[in-house]
Amino acid sequence: MILDFFDMLLKTYGYFGIFLISMISSATIILPLPSSIFIFAAGAILNPFLVGLSAGIGSALGEFSGYMLGFGGRQVIKRKWKWWVKETNKLSKRYGIFWILILFAVTPLPDDIPGILAGTLKYPIKKFFIAVFIGKLILNLALAYAGFFGARWILNYFGLSL
């Protein structure tokens, strides 16, 4: 059902559909939604740079759901898990949460947890967006270009074309 909805968004709205698919799938907390396959497929059909850019912006905006969850629930989190907040605050100061956000955004690691952490620690929202955007842009450009070159290679191998 959700895959049919994503398919409709992609076919109807093109780049804006990619933006919406990426934003919706990144806005889910813990439960992943499969946007990667649509970005890969769209990269084979549309301009892969614009696909990666649209998906990167949408994904970065979708990650604000985790940030807001952490920001809104920080009093509860601080009260219940005081030791956790203290230790993560020390670690973020020592290693820099900016690089951790990029690392989690560019890999398939669950990036909701660092987003919640950033909100809990009141990490500056502009820095949060920039870090997540950098990571999501790299990831989505890689997916789109993999679709662009991969789909063409597979089709050429079987004597077909787009």
Image: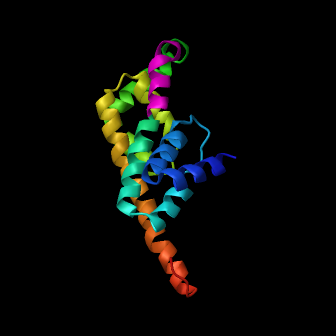
Residue farthest along the right direction in this orientation? 1
The stretch of residues the image draws in magenta is 64-77
Q: Is residue 71 left or right of residue 35?
A: left
Q: Work out whether residue 47 can be spotted.
A: yes
Q: Residue 141 lies in magenta, yes or no?
A: no
> Residue at horizontal 53%, vertical 13%?
76
> Residue at horizontal 54%, vertical 85%?
157
Q: Residue 69 lies in magenta, yes or no?
A: yes
Please identify the quarter of the rendering in which residue 86 is found. top left
Q: Nearer the viewer, residue 81 or 39?
A: 39
> Residue at horizontal 55%, vertical 84%?
160
Residue farthest along the front direction in this orientation? 12
Where residue 80 appears, x then y in whole percent?
Answer: 55, 14
Q: Work out whether residue 100 can be spotted.
A: no
The colour scheme applied to this rendered structure is rainbow
Where residue 14 appears, x then y in whole percent?
Answer: 46, 54
Q: Would you place residue 92 above or below residue 143 in this image? A: above
Q: Nearer the viewer, residue 155 or 124?
A: 155
Q: Nearer the viewer, residue 30 or 99?
A: 30
